[in-house]
Image (cartoon, rainbow, N blue to C red):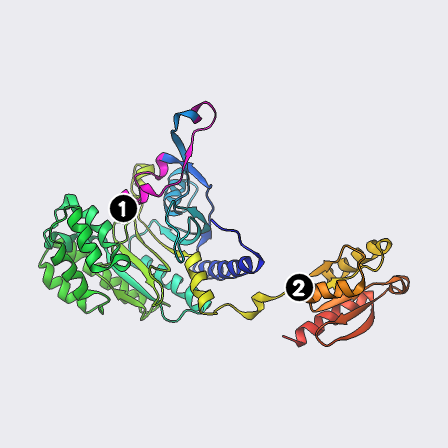
Amino acid sequence: MRDFLPEDVRRRHYVIDVVRRVYERYGFEPLETPTLENIETLTGKYGEEGNKLIFKVLKRGEGESSGEADLALRYDLTVPLARVVADNRAKLPRFFKRYQIQPVWRADRPARGRFREFYQCDVDALGSTPPAVEAELCSAVSDALVELGFTDFVIRLNHRQLLASILLACGVPAALQGTALVTVDKLDKVGAEGVKAELLQRGVPGGAALLRAFQAANDAPTGELDRLAEFLGDEPGGMSAIANLREIVALAAGTKADGRIRIDPSLARGLSYYTGAIMEIAVADLAGSLGGGGRYDNLVGMFLGQDVPACGFSLGLERILVVMGERNMFPPALARSAADVMVSVFDQKDLGSAMAVAGRLRADGLRVLVYPDADKIGKQIKYADSRGIPFVALLGSNEVAAGTVTVKDLKAQTQQTYDQAAAGAAIREALNDRG
C-alpha cells in the first residue's frame, strides 16, 4: 500500500481517463461499490488460494476480543457486482453493461507490479450468453491498451470446460481438477518443473501428461483447436468449448482485438467462479498479465437464487503503470508544472489584490498559484522556476494603483506589463505558441 506523489497521481489519472473514455464508447455504464463487504459475500468465491488473501476486518465493540471477522476489504470488483445485480435486479436492464474503476485489497506478497492495494478497471456484461459478449470485451480492452500506446500485447484465450476435458483425458479425476487448475495457473510464474512438483505434492495424477498436452499447444494458432479436438475425441464438453472458442475468434475478427487473440490451452486463471471462456492479456517483458477475465454464469445465482449469464474483463492499473513507466510511454505533458502562472506578493497589504488578479487569471482558464508570503522577489521567482512554473505575475504597489500586472516569462527572461483584464489572454497565447 503506497503513497502517490503528484507525478504518480497525474499518470494514474491519465490511464484511468483513457480507459474510462474507451469503456464508455462501448456503452458501459459506471458503477461503484463499498470498500467493505460482509465476509460471507466474499469467502468461497475465489478458490483456496484466493480465500487466504482476503483482508478480514475484526468485529467491533464487544465482539473485538473474539478475534472473529464479520467484514472484509473488497478482494475484486466482480463478486460485489454480482451482489449488486442480485440486490437491484428489478432496477437494472435485462442486458446490463457496467464499468468500475476502484481499488481492491489482497494480502499478497508484493512484487514488481503486484501490491496489496491496487486498482482494477473492470468491464462486465450481464444477461446474455452469445460469444459476441466475449468478443466485444476483448475489443474494448484492446482498444484501451492501443490508445495507451501498447502494440505488442496478446490476448490468451481458453475455456474452463476445455481445461476440464483435457484434465480428464490426462487422468485427473473430477475431484482433483480444482486443485490441478490452481497449480496449472502458476505455469508462467514457477515454470513447468515447479508445476510438476506441486501437482505431485498435491497428489494430482497425470502431471507429466498434462504438461505435455499444454506445452504442445501453448500460444498456438487457432488451427491447433483441430489437434485438441482429435486429442479429446468425441467428449461433448470439450467439443462444445472448442466450438465456443472458434466463434469468439471469428467474431473478434471484426473488432479491435483482430489478430491479437491466441488460443492457449494452459491458461487456467485460478478464480473458481469462471464457467466458460477465460482471457488474459500478456506482454513480453512482464511476468504475469496486464489483466484478464472470463465468463461466470453461476456467480450472480449465489446471491439471487437464479443464474444470470455474465462475462467480464479486468485491466490491472498498477501493472499497466509499471510497464508504461519502464517503456517511457507517458506523454511529456504529464510532467507539467502545478500551475501556468504564479502571482507574486510584494507587500502583505496587497495580498487581496493578488487574490483578485489570480481569480481573473483562473477565469481565463489558467492554473494559478498565489505565493502567500511577501518574500524578496528574487526568492519568489526562484521558487516558481524550481516548480517549473513558466510565468510570474508581478504585482507591486505601482501595478496595484494602475490596475495592471507585469508578466515575467521565465524561459525567455522577458517581461511585459498588461492591463489586468488582458493579462490572462496574453499568457494563454504564449502557452499555446509553445504547444
Q: Residue at x 77, y 71 (%)?
A: 408
Real-space Cα distance between discs 1 and 2? Answer: 50 Å
- Going by the image, does 355 lie left or right of 180? right
Q: Secondary structure at mark 1?
A: loop
Out of 263 and 182, give the one closest to the viewer. Answer: 182
The kind of residue on which mark 1 rests is Ser
Image quadrant for the C terminus?
bottom right
Looking at the picture, how far across and down is residue 119, in whole percent?
45, 52
Residue extent of the magenta highlight: 40-64
User: Can the viewer see residue 341?
Assistant: no
- Going by the image, does 40 lie left or right of 275? right
Q: Which residue is mark 2?
A: 387
Local crowd at mark 1 within 10 Å, few (<14), some, or many (≥20)?
some
Q: Which residue is mark 1?
A: 272
Looking at the picture, how far across and down is residue 251, in whole percent?
30, 65
Looking at the picture, how far across and down is residue 316, in whole percent?
41, 56
- Going by the image, does 50 lie left or right of 105? left
Name which quarter of the figure residue 131 lies in. bottom left
Out of 73 and 385, give the one closest to the viewer. Answer: 385
Q: Residue at x 48, y 25 (%)?
A: 61
Q: Secondary structure at mark 2?
A: loop
The kind of residue on which mark 2 rests is Arg
- Going by the image, does 272 lie left or right of 1? left
Looking at the picture, how far across and down is residue 21, in whole percent?
49, 60
Vertical arrangement, residue 75 with respect to residue 345, above or below: above
User: Can the viewer see residue 312?
Assistant: yes
